[in-house]
């Protein structure tokens, strides 16, 4: 069943939803990266919660005008307007009062959301209009999604992506160094507003699929996941888009297999799965890689310290060091170095002496910056350079044993 | 009338304004009602190296940021070669304090330097070979070309500062404004930076730096600007960097012995 869903064999509608969710996921991941890099991830939470009163008010207005109140375009327009009001309130509070941004986010988020819930309650007591289904904007539901809805999501998602491509340079510069960006003639305030505008657009088009409570996850989890895999902002943007698209696609497919499953939470859980996986196995920044690196580093430090101690005829007391030296066949159980141990110890001491000379010499600064107490200097300098250093330190010396 | 009298009382005339690569008039910056910088005038001579000095909290960085439009001043105007700031922004390169950014940001050294070419690249311009070559050249001038591909988080503090300077060099500006370029850097970096700044001066560029190390003012700079919320003194080092002006700027807080600063032969 799930396999069928993933291969788009569950029928036209399910396929439409999966593709729409993937596009939304890509737009959200790419946009969210700039928010994450600007360290304003939670602003999107305020924006998304601020959409709710707009949904309610749009419904009421459309019913009052004689419509049935569930026109998607109308509801989205309403949500965009109230999200804009929320964003404006947030920006006004942080600029004109002494409130820090986190407090302002809390205030805007809760007040707008509370107002929205009140409106939804009022709507449920109304006799006119077909109010059933408005709650689906909270957690997302793709059950009744139409072809035109999917098209709206696809086209708006593509437009958001075009805007991200155009604005990527100023958004990156503002995220990294806003002061410098300002001196380049970039209006930091306008770029921030543009970023928020894109976030708002993603939120609004994601209302139907993911719902307003969880859209923040689509904006934040994919960038955080992508950050584990790359140290270059451009690649983080692309990877975040890819993770978002994959989460949207797989999540929508899973939810299509069981009609009762809400789409938004499933998509978020899939995204979270990618996050956990990346956190564990990513090379470089991943947890496992970091642990392995740390343990390996610890062993190398102990071995090196042990060898240096042997070279200088000092006894080795530390247990781990003794164990490592003995296991490598460099030291006997009674603490006396083996022949191989003597050779290795002498080499370690020579290496250390060479490094000291290199680090004291500003001409070798590039090489000196690679000093970590472990690296073999022969991997850093050329043979000629080392010979020159050796002349300075009086050549390889015999080591006392 | 009163205004006229005040203007006549100023040391520099409006004729100097037109020639100065960086002139500030009546700059006031306030947080709430507490002024951080109050009614400051500054006229930087062309081709000079000027140190802005003053105690902690004197408003040195604030003055620079406000003059650049990064902070919004309460009042005051800034001219660059006699023209308003907004018309000539491309002639100014700014080096912010190193600590003002997050160095874990996912970007490489070369990408940071390329940010200095934003005016040329614009929104969509492709980074071409000649842009890369220019960025590499700027890195070479600060001795960081071997680090071009490194992630910026792997750099030491001094190396970070040199990357920031390389980014400013990429702008090829007439006027260089630096905020504490020597703060917390190693000796090798300090030497590298001052060599680059002196090259700029030789090439006829103007350099203004917020500086905190009084013992090197004489060696590095030819002009000083002493600030403690208000302007205390301004001029060539020999005239404006005196025990009296330092006393006025720092009050009793001058930690370094004045003997060290002034007893040395002034060569």
Image: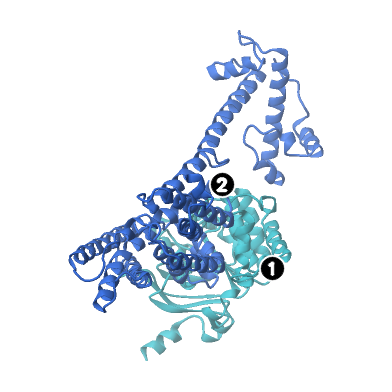
> Is residue B256 visible to the viewer in this orientation of the structure?
no
- Of A197 and B158, nearer the camera is A197
Q: Is residue A279 left or right of residue B135?
A: left
Q: In this view, does B123 lie above or below A133?
A: below
What number is the disc on residue A304?
none
Q: Is label 1 or label 2 in front? A: 2
Q: In this view, does A252 lie above or below A388?
A: below
Task: Say which of A276 and A74 sits in front.
Answer: A74
Find out whether the residues at labels 1 and 2 contact each other: C-beta distance under 8 Å.
no
The answer to whether residue A320 is visible is: yes
Q: Which residue is drawn at 58% across and 30% down?
A: A297
- Note the chain letter of the blue one: A
**Left of A167 or right of it: where is A360?**
right
Apparent colour of chain B = cyan
Q: Name the residue under label 2.
A: A229
Instruction: Compute the Cα span from label 1 to label 2.
Output: 45 Å
Is B56 drawn above or below residue A184 in the view shown? above
Q: In this view, does B222 lie to the left or right of A205?
A: right
Q: Do labels 1 and 2 share a chain?
A: no
Q: Mark 1 lies on which chain?
A: B
SS category of the residue bearing label 2: loop
Front residue of this view, candidates B95 and A87 = A87
What residue is shown at x 63% (from left), y 25% (from top)?
A304
Q: Quadrant of the C terminus of chain A?
A: top right
Residue that mark 1 sits on? B202
Few, some or many residues within 10 Å of mark 2 (<14, 14–19, 20+) = many
The x and y percentages for residue B257 are 48, 52
Give how far across and how far down residue B113 sits, in percent: 62, 60
Circle 1 Cα neighbour tier, 10 Å, few/some/many (<14 / 14–19 / ≥20): few
- Which type of secondary structure does the marked residue at label 1 adopt? helix
Q: Which residue is drawn at 64% across and 43% down?
A: A369
Identify the chain of the residue marked 2, using the numbered disc in the image.
A
């Amino acid at each position: 069943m799930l396999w069928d869903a993933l291969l788009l064999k569950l029928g036209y509608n399910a396929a439409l939803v999966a593709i729409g969710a993937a596009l939304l996921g890509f737009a959200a991941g790419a946009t969210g990266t700039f928010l994450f890099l600007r360290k304003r991830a939670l602003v999107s939470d305020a924006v998304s919660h601020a959409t709710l009163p707009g949904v309610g008010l749009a419904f009421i207005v459309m019913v009052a005008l004689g419509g049935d109140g569930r026109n998607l375009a109308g509801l989205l327009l309403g949500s965009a307007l109230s999200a804009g009001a929320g964003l404006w309130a947030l920006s006004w509070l942080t600029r004109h009062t002494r409130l820090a941004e986190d407090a302002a986010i809390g205030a805007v988020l809760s007040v707008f959301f509370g107002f929205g819930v009140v409106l939804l309650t009022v709507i449920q007591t109304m006799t006119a209009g077909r109010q059933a289904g408005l709650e689906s904007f909270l957690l997302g539901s793709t059950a009744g999604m139409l072809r035109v809805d999917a098209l709206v999501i696809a086209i708006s998602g593509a437009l958001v992506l075009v805007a991200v491509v155009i604005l990527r340079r100023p958004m990156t510069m503002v995220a990294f160094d806003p002061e410098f960006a300002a001196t380049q003639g970039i209006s930091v305030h306008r770029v921030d507003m543009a970023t928020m505008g894109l976030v708002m657009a993603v939120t609004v088009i994601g209302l139907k699929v993911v719902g307003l409570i969880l859209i923040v996850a689509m904006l934040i989890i994919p960038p955080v996941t992508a950050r584990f895999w790359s140290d270059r902002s451009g690649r983080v943007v692309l990877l975040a888009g890819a993770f978002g698209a994959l989460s949207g696609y797989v999540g929508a497919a899973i939810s299509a297999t069981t009609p009762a499953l809400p789409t938004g939470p499933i998509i978020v859980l899939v995204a979270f799965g990618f996050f956990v996986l990346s956190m564990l196995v990513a090379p470089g920044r991943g947890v496992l890689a970091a642990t392995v690196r740390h343990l390996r580093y610890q062993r190398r430090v102990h071995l090196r310290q042990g060898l240096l101690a042997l070279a200088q005829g000092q006894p080795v007391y530390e247990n781990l060091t003794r164990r490592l030296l003995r296991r490598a066949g460099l030291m006997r159980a009674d603490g006396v170095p083996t022949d191989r141990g003597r050779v290795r110890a002498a080499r370690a001491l020579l290496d250390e002496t060479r490094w000291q000379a290199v680090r004291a010499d500003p001409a070798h600064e590039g090489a000196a910056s690679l000093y970590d107490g472990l690296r073999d200097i022969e991997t850093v300098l050329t043979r000629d350079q080392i010979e020159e250093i050796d002349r300075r330190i009086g050549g390889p010396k015999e080591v006392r044993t | 009338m009163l205004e006229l009298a005040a203007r006549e009382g100023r040391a520099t005339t409006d004729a100097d304004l037109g020639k100065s690569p960086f002139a500030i008039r009546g700059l006031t910056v306030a947080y709430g009602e507490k002024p951080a910088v109050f009614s400051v005038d500054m006229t930087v001579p062309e081709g000079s190296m000027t140190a802005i000095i003053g105690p902690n909290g004197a408003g040195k960085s604030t003055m620079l940021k406000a003059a650049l439009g990064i902070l919004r001043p309460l009042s005051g105007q800034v001219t660059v070669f006699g023209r308003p700031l907004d018309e000539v922004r491309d002639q100014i390169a700014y080096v912010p304090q190193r600590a003002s950014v997050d160095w874990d940001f996912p970007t490489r050294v070369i990408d940071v330097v390329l940010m200095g070419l934003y005016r040329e690249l614009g929104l969509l311009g492709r980074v071409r070979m000649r842009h890369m070559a220019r960025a590499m050249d700027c890195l070479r001038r600060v001795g960081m070309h071997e680090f071009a591909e490194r992630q910026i988080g792997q750099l030491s503090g001094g190396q970070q500062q040199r990357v920031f300077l390389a980014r400013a060099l990429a702008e090829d500006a007439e006027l260089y404004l630096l905020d504490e370029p020597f703060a917390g850097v190693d000796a090798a970096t300090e030497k590298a930076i001052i060599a680059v700044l002196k090259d700029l001066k030789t090439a006829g560029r103007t350099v203004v730096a917020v500086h905190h190390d009084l013992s090197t003012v004489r060696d590095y700079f030819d002009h000083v600007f002493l600030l403690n919320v208000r302007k205390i003194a301004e001029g060539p080092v020999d005239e404006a960097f005196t025990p009296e002006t330092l006393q006025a700027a720092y009050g009793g807080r001058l930690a370094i012995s004045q003997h060290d600063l002034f007893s040395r032969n002034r060569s």
